[in-house]
RNA sequence: CGGGGUGUAGCGCAGCCUGGGUAGCGCACCUGCCUUGGGAGCAGGGGGUCGGAGGUUCGAAUCCUCUCACCCCGACCA
């Protein structure tokens, strides 16, 4: 491709509304342009990177035995009503009516459609295992789209769905996908972790997320330093205390704490560390108040509590509810004397003589103790793990915290959708059975964004060769110099012959201008054809990542590029 | 949806509050000259319903009311 004939609108200045580096660089490199909130045009460079990821995904999915199809973006409401997600999905589902007033939605995911397809066509155990996938634009009317392609409303996703005769076979399908995903992200050149995850609104029995490690990631994940355990903080298990601290219970004490509400304020005021305090959070679970008790330095994990209570909606209580439940304004809640359900974190079980709120204005209690002073309905793991917590799986390890970008998610669905949509088959004995499903997503655009998040410097993007829009850029420094022009053209055509994807910068611009653009758009290899070196019969080969420069003869440069590209693409 | 902020040329911004009166700067763009190893220089030029509607006023980017959009912080997710 000739740069002068192409469409790469780079910009020098960083757009003010782009927060994260991948968003800034994708805009500056002319890869994407915003059309509306969370909705983007993909320009040539962005599209090429996306196609690269798509192709890697496609190859690995095919290798794993999955079969590509394409389902519609517009889906009829009936299917969603059948799975009961028409009501459950909420406002993220973009709904509308056609001219006959029939209801439709833009597909945010395709469990319903694919299950409908399969239930019509798959009748026998002989037709499974079956794994169908597609690469297609999804629409989710996100509350807050942000970070460019990282969280758009319309986004390109690979979604796959497996169909198996029973749970054991479904486990095998899941495992195949898990391994395919590892290969995919390895081939993309990403540093990532596969972590245990909560299943969320998709539902199902268990799942793993594939997290690209990046400080800008929206998810917190933990991994064990000594074993394989890794999990999303939403899911990560905390160990309870080994044995309770042995301490004689001291007499309960009431202390005035004028206007001291937060853990920090009370801690400072009383000179008691937060780890010796218990905080009492008032929540509402499906309209019923619940109090959660946590060690002062721990945070509530709402997902764990929600799963524990089995409620549909769990939210922090408003001021009125807090006052009603505790008899005191916000900031002085404590478990002593409460009439509502109290769930305590496991860590609280090991505590003695701690500080809590006194359920009255400006009052806290010291030397509070379990059983003597109050009872707990239930002990459970309801907190977020923190850096340094012991690993829940092995004896020796401590948990490390990371930030991650979720680029892929594999779910074991079980029979949630097949039962709702009556997707059944006849087994060898002629008995009707329910199909076991799994579903597997990869955010294609997000993967590109995550890659840029991990691969950039002050000059711009540094694409790994497998997903770079072009492998190599040939910068002809002065196109008005016939010798330079001819040499650049020759290299360009030779590289094309060798199957290298090459961009020829044949614009009539100054060298610095071309270098800046080449760096910004992140082409991994650059051949510079300049008058001085050319007079010696040499051109320069520069590696974008390392900055290493080799002075080579024309043929040598072409050969080097060919070799390096082949090495990088070798799988 | 709650809290905060911003809308002025393609991009980045000043002007507004605190004096209501010609709409400005840098980059980008067009023409010419010059220049060709890290976003050059000189000269000339084009481009604005100042987010929208209403109001106050002789006169509004500026003051008032309403509205829309976008961005940031919290609950969702690939």
Image: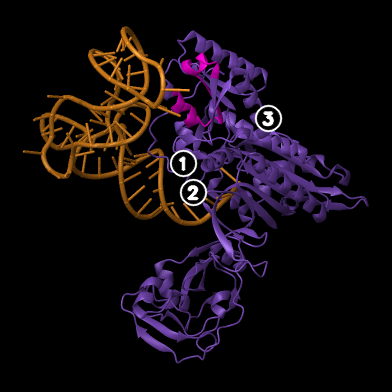
**Mark sitting on residue A216:** 2
Q: Is residue A88 left or right of residue B2?
A: right
Element carrying mark 3: helix
- Is residue A384 visible to the viewer in this orientation of the structure? yes
Report if the CB atoms under discs 1 and 2 are less than 8 Å apart.
yes
Chain in purple colour: A
Query: Mark 3 Cα within 10 Å, few/some/many (few <14, many 20+)?
Result: some
Q: Which one is in front, B40 or A244?
A: B40
Task: Give the spatial CA distance, label 2 vs label 3.
Answer: 32 Å
In the image, farthest residue toward the front: A536
Task: Give the spatial CA distance, label 1 vs label 2.
Answer: 9 Å
What residue is shown with label 3? A566
What residue is shown with label 1? A21
Chain to which mark 3 belongs: A
Q: Which one is in front, A275 or A520?
A: A520
Element carrying mark 2: loop
Chain in orange colour: B
Q: Is residue A85 left or right of residue A248?
A: right
């Amino acid at each position: 491709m000739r740069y002068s004939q192409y469409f790469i609108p780079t910009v020098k200045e960083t757009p003010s509304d782009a927060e994260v580096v991948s968003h800034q660089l994708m805009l500056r490199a002319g890869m994407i342009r915003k059309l509306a909130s969370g909705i983007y045009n993909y320009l040539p460079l962005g599209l090429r990177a996306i196609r690269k990821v798509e192709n890697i995904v496609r190859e690995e999915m095919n290798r794993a035995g999955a079969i590509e199809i394409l389902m519609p973006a517009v889906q009829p409401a009936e299917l969603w009503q059948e799975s009961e997600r028409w009501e459950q999905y909420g406002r993220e589902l973009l709904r509308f009516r056609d001219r006959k007033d029939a209801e439709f939605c833009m597909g945010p995911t395709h469990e319903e459609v694919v299950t409908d397809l399969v239930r019509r066509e798959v009748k026998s155990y002989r037709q499974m295992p079956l794994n169908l996938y597609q690469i297609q634009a999804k629409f989710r009317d996100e509350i807050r789209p942000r970070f460019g392609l990282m969280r758009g409303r319309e986004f390109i996703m690979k979604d796959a769905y497996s169909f198996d005769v029973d749970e054991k076979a479904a486990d095998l399908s899941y495992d195949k996908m898990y391994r395919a995903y590892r290969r995919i992200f390895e081939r993309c050149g990403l540093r990532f972790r596969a972590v245990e995850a909560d299943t969320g609104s998709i539902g199902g029995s268990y799942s793993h997320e594939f997290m690209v490690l990046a400080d800008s990631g929206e998810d917190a994940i933990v991994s064990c330093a000594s074993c394989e355990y890794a999990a999303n903080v939403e899911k990560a298990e905390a160990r309870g205390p080994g044995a309770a601290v042995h301490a004689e219970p001291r007499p309960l004490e009431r202390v005035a704490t004028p206007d001291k509400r937060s853990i920090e304020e009370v801690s400072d005021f009383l000179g008691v560390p937060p780890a010796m305090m218990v905080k009492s959070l008032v929540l509402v679970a499906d309209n019923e108040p619940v109090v959660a008790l946590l060690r002062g330095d721990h945070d509530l994990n709402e997902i764990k509590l929600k799963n524990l209570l089995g409620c549909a909606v769990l939210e922090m209580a408003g001021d009125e509810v807090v006052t009603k439940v505790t008899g005191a304004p916000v900031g002085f809640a404590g478990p002593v004397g409460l009439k509502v359900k109290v769930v305590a974190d496991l860590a609280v079980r090991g505590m003695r003589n701690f500080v809590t709120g006194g359920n009255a204005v400006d009052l806290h209690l010291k030397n509070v103790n379990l059983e003597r002073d109050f009872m707990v309905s239930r002990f459970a793991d309801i907190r977020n793990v923190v850096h340094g917590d012991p690993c829940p799986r092995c004896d020796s390890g401590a948990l490390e915290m990371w930030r991650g970008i979720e680029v892929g998610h594999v779910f074991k669905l079980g029979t949630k959708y097949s039962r709702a949509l009556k997707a059944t088959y006849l087994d060898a004995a002629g008995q009707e059975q329910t199909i076991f499903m799994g579903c597997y997503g990869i955010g294609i655009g997000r993967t590109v964004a995550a890659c840029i998040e991990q691969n950039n410097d002050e000059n711009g993007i540094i694409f790994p060769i497998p997903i770079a829009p072009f492998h190599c850029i040939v910068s002809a420094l002065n196109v008005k110099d016939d010798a330079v022009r001819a040499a650049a053209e020759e290299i360009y055509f030779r590289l094309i012959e060798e199957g290298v994807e090459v961009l020829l910068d044949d614009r009539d611009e100054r060298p610095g201008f071309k270098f800046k653009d080449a760096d910004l758009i992140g082409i991994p290899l650059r051949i510079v054809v300049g008058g001085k070196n050319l007079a010696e019969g040499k051109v320069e080969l520069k590696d974008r990542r390392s900055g290493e420069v080799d002075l080579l003869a024309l043929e040598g440069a072409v050969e080097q590029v060919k070799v390096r590209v082949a090495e990088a693409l070798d799988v």
